[in-house]
Image: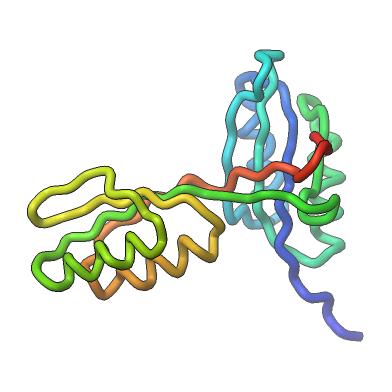
Amino acid sequence: MALEPEITAVISVLVENESGVLARVIGLFSGRGYNIESLTVAPVEGGRGRSRINIVTSGTPMVIEQIKALLDRLVPVHRVSDLTKDGPHVAREMALIKVVSTGELRSEALRIADAFRARPVDTTTGSFVFELTGGTEKLDTFIELLRPLGLVEVSRTGIAAIARGPRTI
């Protein structure tokens, strides 16, 4: 019998914005040995006392279904949506990337940043901090290109995702 391939899923969860909810969601993953590749949390628009959690995780299709079912049973959870399965969605993340370099390496870092539409948000005579927003692959590629040019630090937000069109969570 062939093993099922692992897939990556972007799951959005609408929860009560109250103390301990995030700990319960994370506990669900850690207690069963599931990995969270990306996690973002923020209150939803409208101030109804709810927050949206975007989770990127991976596993077999059966594991992803199990994760969604377990999330749906948590008490403060209002809704669970698998954006990767439910239809087209937009997923973006933001990163701050620090490069320390001088001379030609510095010029090359600026050229690459311009090509990727990265914005310098801090500049000194020996360093830059670039801000870049986009898909995960775009950020990964940019970071790899800057690695030999003096990349010293990266801070990423994690994925924010939403369904395309009129669908909502």
Based on the displayed image, in which of its 4 quarters is residue 152 positioned? bottom left
Based on the displayed image, in which of its 4 quarters is residue 50 positioned? top right
Q: Residue furthest bottom?
A: 1
Q: Quadrant of the C terminus?
A: top right
Based on the displayed image, in which of its 4 quarters is residue 3 positioned? bottom right
Q: Position of residue 69 (x, y in %)?
A: 87, 45
Q: Quadrant of the N terminus?
A: bottom right
Camera-side residue of 87 and 118: 118
Q: Total marks drawn?
A: 0
Indicate the colouring scheme: rainbow
Above or below 93: residue 113: below
Q: Residue at x 26, y 55 (%)?
A: 98
Q: Position of residue 2 (x, y in %)?
A: 87, 84
Q: Is 42 situated left or right of 62 in this image?
A: left
Camera-side residue of 38 and 130: 130
Q: Residue at x 9, y 69 (%)?
A: 103
Q: Position of residue 76 (x, y in %)?
A: 76, 25
Q: Is 57 situated left or right of 140 in this image?
A: right
Q: Position of residue 47 (x, y in %)?
A: 66, 14
Q: Residue at x 18, y 67 (%)?
A: 107
Above or below 145: residue 46: above
Camera-side residue of 151 and 39: 151
Q: Residue at x 66, y 36 (%)?
A: 53
